[in-house]
Amino acid sequence: MSAVSTELLSRFDVAGPRYTSYPTADRFVEAFNTDDYIGALQQRRTGAAALSLPLSLYVHVPFCESLCYYCACNKIITKHHEKGADYLRYLGREIDLHTAHIGTGQVVTQLHLGGGSPTFLSDAELGELMQMIRRSFTLAPGGEYSIEVDPRTVDAARLEHLARLGFNRLSFGVQDFDAAVQKAVHRIQPARQVFDLVEAARARGFESVNVDLIYGLPRQTPESFDRTLAQVNELRPDRIALYAYAHLPQRFKPQRRILDAELPNAAGKVTMLSRSLDAFMAAGYVYVGMDHFALPNDALAVAKRQGRLHRNFQGYSTQPDCDLIGLGVSAIGRVGATYSQNAKTLEEYCDHLDQGRLPVVRGLALSRDDLVRRGVIMALMCQGALQFESIELAYLIDFRSYFAAELGALEALQEQGLVVVTGTGIEVTATGWFFVRAVAMVFDRYLQADRNRTRFSKII
């Protein structure tokens, strides 16, 4: 029996946020500036949060040697590796400006390097970056320290170097093993190369290896993707992230190189998703939620079983709710009841730092209503359930009156078997967990007021 019917998948083939935050990043405003961010940093330093909340770091490295046509990330395509050294100097300035406001030695339990391709940096440059971080922060023993890896830029020796630097988790960008699809998206990487790297990572003792896949790419068919699924199951990474390709050429120029005629139709995409769910669950993977699968003994699957899942700008996490400092071009952070984002262009980012200012150009100070709804949405997205009383005690509201309209809207989802609403709370069903974004969207005040959802990816 399929994990979920294609009919139900087709019904929810609609656009919606991924809820790595609430409110979502498209709600950030330029009225929130560097001074607001500094205020949040200083409040963390002087408040109780500095003692009780762990800290997470995200570092964005925007450089890539070649362009992948599907990519919607903030990146800079260049073969000039000397740009890496210049960028590190600016990252050092940004780190120093942060420690001027929060002090040195704050404990970090989670570090993630993303991009772009962090492995664009040389071994020496990655070592320099980690030294800068360790001089300013304290990396806690047993923390999660991960890096995104372009398989085309590393070998076993480089993986060994990453382990020596302290990284204990890797994420390999695969997308698809099919040669025709790789050619269509301008990303050629033989399957053997990935298999060898994963084997080397296991031999070195990395705690978790993730593989990213994308369905809906040009020249993909359900049959061709079946072959990729079989290869991934043979590879057996600890985690799998399966994303739907969002074709938005009007927003992302690289996607204009993809021919619309080569894209699979909606039915083909739904079939690929359905077969992926079946294949991974048959292979013993746990559906963690929102595109994420993990082997039963992986920390992410364990956290789901124990009700300890959390969600941040990198997706699902085992780390408790914490402040996040984003470093680098376009990086997003969360400190206290604020979100912030750095300048999106390298020129503007460097200009701010040349002036001795943190490069924050927009963000959001959350209102009381934002905080209440964030609590509800994150409970649904992470635990798949909430008790009215817990929300009422945390935010001093009467849940049924505050969310009367939303509870009414949930009736349709309850009829479809996605949720169960009782007198004391809301529970997402086993089937509903595959559509948890649709459940969360009911409580998104901004989304309900603005029906223009074309900026979002499809929820399945």
Image: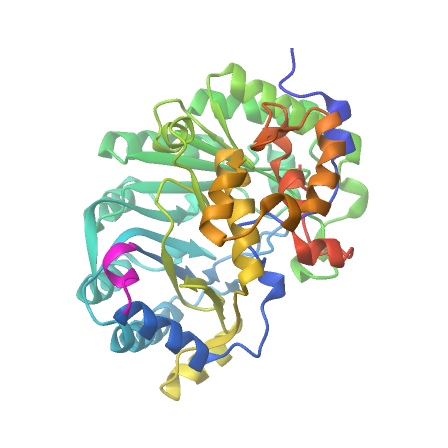
> How many numbered markers are drawn?
0
Q: Quadrant of residue 42?
A: bottom left
Residue at image coords 58%, 23%: 430
**Residue at image location 62% in from the left, 62% down from the top:** 26
Left or right, 71 with respect to 338, comes to right
Question: Is residue 100 in view from this perspective?
Answer: yes
Residue 53 in the magenta stretch? The answer is yes
Question: Residue 116 appears at what percent x and percent y?
Answer: 48, 57
Q: What's the residue at 39%, 83% (across, down)?
A: 357
Query: Considering only vertical position in the picture, is 237 above or below 34?
Result: above
Q: Would residue 420 be found to the left or right of residue 173 on screen? A: right
9, above or below 137, in the image: above
Residue 433 x %, y %: 59, 30
Q: Between residue 8 and residue 396, name the one nearer to us.
A: 396
The vertical placement of 88 against 199, above or below, is: below
With respect to residue 196, does 440 lie above or below?
below
Residue 53, position in %: x, y? Answer: 30, 55
For this rendering, which residue is in front, 65 or 53?
A: 53
Quadrant housing residue 309: top left
State whether residue 58 appears in this view: no
Which image quarter holds the C terminus? top right
Q: Position of residue 25 (x, y in %)?
A: 57, 61
Q: Which residues are magenta?
A: 47-54
Residue plotted at (28% across, 54% down): 54
Q: Looking at this rendering, what residue extends furthest in the bottom direction?
A: 355
Query: Is residue 84 on the magenta stretch?
Result: no
Question: According to the image, what is the colour scheme of the structure?
Answer: rainbow
